Amino acid sequence: MREGCRKAVTLLTGGTGFLGSHLLRHLVSEERPVVVLKRSFSDDSRIRGLSGRYEAWDLDSGPVEEVFQNYEVERVIHCATNYGYEDTVPWETIEANLILPLKLVHLARRAGARTFVNTDTILDKRINHYSLSKHQFIDWMRNYASDIACINIALEHFYGPEDNASKFVTRVLMDLFEKKPRIPLTPGEQRRDFIYIDDVIDGFSRILSAHSDSPSGYYEYEIGTGQSVSIQDFVRLMKRLSGNQETFLDFGALAYRSNEVMNSAVDNRALRALGWEPRYTLEQGLQKMLEAKGYREERCVI
């Protein structure tokens, strides 16, 4: 054990990613000691401006158990994820979305941490390996809730500047920026709740504050605006805001996914009870993203 390192910290996974980097900025703005669990080769460009305001622990440089030996981990926030795209084998998705958080909640309980926060998806578990692995971890997390406060936060479709290029909103905007002749899309009748990243972070902030000293147990929240829009209307809005008049939106060129959810509905009553309200309309959020024109090439963020 290294002398002087047993200080109370929040352990954050996925801190170099889109969601995690925004959350890290919030945590350090509150002057909370944070340790970011990452890989030595992780792209840290999103958080480079925060250098010196957090500590990093490279997951591939030693066993994760050593983090709990060297720090007094009071709270774990798990934002690391693998979206399980078509060329990703299932066990890689499971490693990030099930095995890693299972290790962390087990070690957190054993070390006497107060809280474990998991970032979940609103997607049905039948959609893909990503959503299945996310739902499978919830069952495991519930088993630990008798000894540690376990908070599950399910997110609707969040977006914003510097999001991954593989995400739907960013990919369509990139195609519109480049004025591609045609964008192949599904019929677009499915409805989704799109929420701007700043509203998501505000939701996290209120949840973390409300559970700063909660007893052990399992707590659930869903973060979304509560207002869904069809994919057709959403993409047409993006095209209008971008000023692109050339690109043909080819609705119906792609088939729906197997087990596609046609209306994604969020239950944000628990979050609203904490005083949360979305601050950005869909048009305002997209306008901010259009002005930034930023994206990242990423698949897995730990």
Image (cartoon, rainbow, N blue to C red):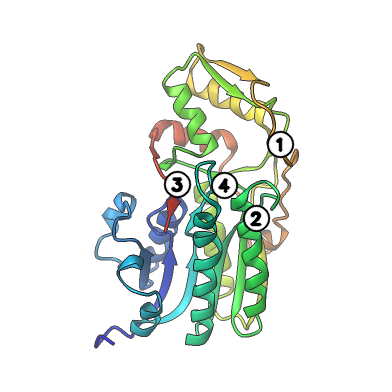
* Residue type of the residue flagged with mark 1: Arg
Using residue 115 as the reference point, say whether residue 179 is left or right of it: left
* Residue type of the residue flagged with mark 3: Arg
Please name which of the two marks, 1 or 2, marks the residue nearer to the observer: 2
Alpha carbons under labels 1 and 3: distance apart? 25 Å
Residue 148 location, quadrant: bottom right
Element at label 1: strand
| Closer-to-camera residue (156/127) | 127
The answer to whether the residue labelled 4 contacts the one labelled 3, judged by CB atoms less than 8 Å apart, is no
Q: Quadrant of the C terminus?
A: bottom left
Residue 276 seen in the current view: no
Counting every numbered tag in the picture gives 4
Q: Which residue is mark 4?
A: 279
- Closer to the chain start, of discs 2 and 3, is 2
Q: Which residue is mark 2?
A: 132
The answer to whether the residue labelled 2 contacts the one labelled 4, judged by CB atoms less than 8 Å apart, is no
* Residue type of the residue flagged with mark 2: Leu
User: Which residue lies at the image location 70% right of the left edge and 39% below the top edge?
Assistant: 228
Rendered image: mark on residue 191: 1
* Residue type of the residue flagged with mark 4: Arg
Q: Classify 10 Å Cα crowding around label 1: few (below 14), some (14-19), many (20 and above).
A: some
| Closer-to-camera residue (129/185) | 129
User: Which residue lies at the image location 66% right of the left edge and 31% below the top edge?
Assistant: 231
